[in-house]
Amino acid sequence: MVPENKQMDETTHAPQPRAIALISGGLDSLLAARVILAEGCHVEGINFYTGFCVEGHTHAIRQRKLKKPKRNDALWVAAELGIELHIVDISEEYKDVLINPRHGYGAHMNPCLDCKCFMVKKAHEWMLENGFDFIVTGEVVGQRPKSQRRDTMPVVARESGAGNRLLRPLCAQNLPPTLPEEKGWVNRENLYDFNGRSRKPQMALAAQFGFTDYAQPSGGCCFLTDAQYSAKLADLWAARGERTYDMDDIMLLKVGRHIRPRSHFKLIIAREEGENNFMAGYRRRFVHLDTVSHPGPLTLVDGTPNSDDLDLAARLTARFSKGRDANSVTVRITHLDGTTQSVDATPMSPEEIPQDWYL
């Protein structure tokens, strides 16, 4: 008797194999899921939310992104494939992965191998809970220097608990057969042997499947791989004296110019109207500055500034306003208790701002 959660293949009357595919929104995961769909398997997608996704917020915040259509790439991939997508918030659990990675960081603050192990582990738990048979990822041998090497791929399968139920369709022919192949749920001959960092094979396969609009290959989807973002996160931890963060920290690290003139405070200065509007939601949490005499940015002050620090903050705010070439710019300072004061600030010149202030 077939379990209720098993679909029946109409031709053979055998249970249709059920695969859960990790969908990041990138080209590789799109292709991997498409390959398994072509094998006649039932496929659903799963997308894990950590808070560090590049596309998740920047399109909505920065006006310069308006020329590019706003979309969640993972949802778009699912729609293109015609599959259901399960979005799972793992942001709290993910903190331990980021703060205490067993396998260390990549070039920046990216715990890529630990991250992959963790996400496949969560997918494996979901698979067991929902009566699915195997897991699909878009990994390719040799594509990523940390998590997608020939020697680390077995680590992911082992530490996640997925074992031989983890199938990588794009490079399966370079790896030992997995359970889905041994069971005949998929034909190994119809899988691929992609290898290395080049995305030309994937782009050719995308064309074969008729995909013309997809996320830029190798564009990166995680802020933790970005050098500037990683530097700001490291600075945040150093200033606090502990490696902690919350969702608001994650969001504010994504926006504005971050300038630390002194060890006990930093400024987050909006770069355009979209950031001004977004940062306005945090005004009650920070001492903040805005320009009165000229159009200019909203500046949040993170830390414990004294009066001299606020004078410096006013001059920096004036520097990034439309009054940067004026002799004086009127800047309003709003304190945490809601009281305000106005100061006439001389905009700093670029030469007065040491480069090591910029994070």
Image (cartoon, rainbow, N blue to C red):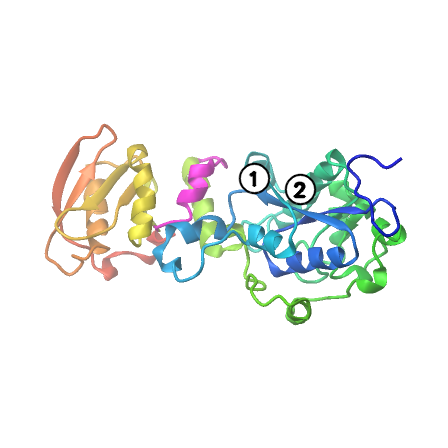
* Disc 2 crowd, CA 10 A, few/some/many (<14, 14-19, 20+): many
Residue 99: numbered disc: 1
Q: Is residue 307 left or right of residue 254?
A: left
In the rendered view, would you say 215 is above or below 306?
below
- The front one of 62 and 91 is 62
Q: Magenta residues?
A: 241-256
Task: Kindly tell me whether residue 238 is visible in this rendering.
Answer: no
Q: Is residue 140 above or below residue 47?
A: below
- Horizontally, is 333 left or right of 66 in the view? left
Query: Residue 187's spot in the image, x, y percent?
Result: 85, 59
- 10 and 304: which is toward the camera: 10
**Neighbour class for label 1 at 10 Å: few (<14), some, many (≥20)?**
some
* Label 1 element class: helix
Q: Where does label 2 land, which residue?
A: 118
Q: Is label 2 in a helix, a strand or a loop?
A: helix
* x then y, percent, for residue 238: 44, 41
- Residue 252 covered by magenta stretch: yes
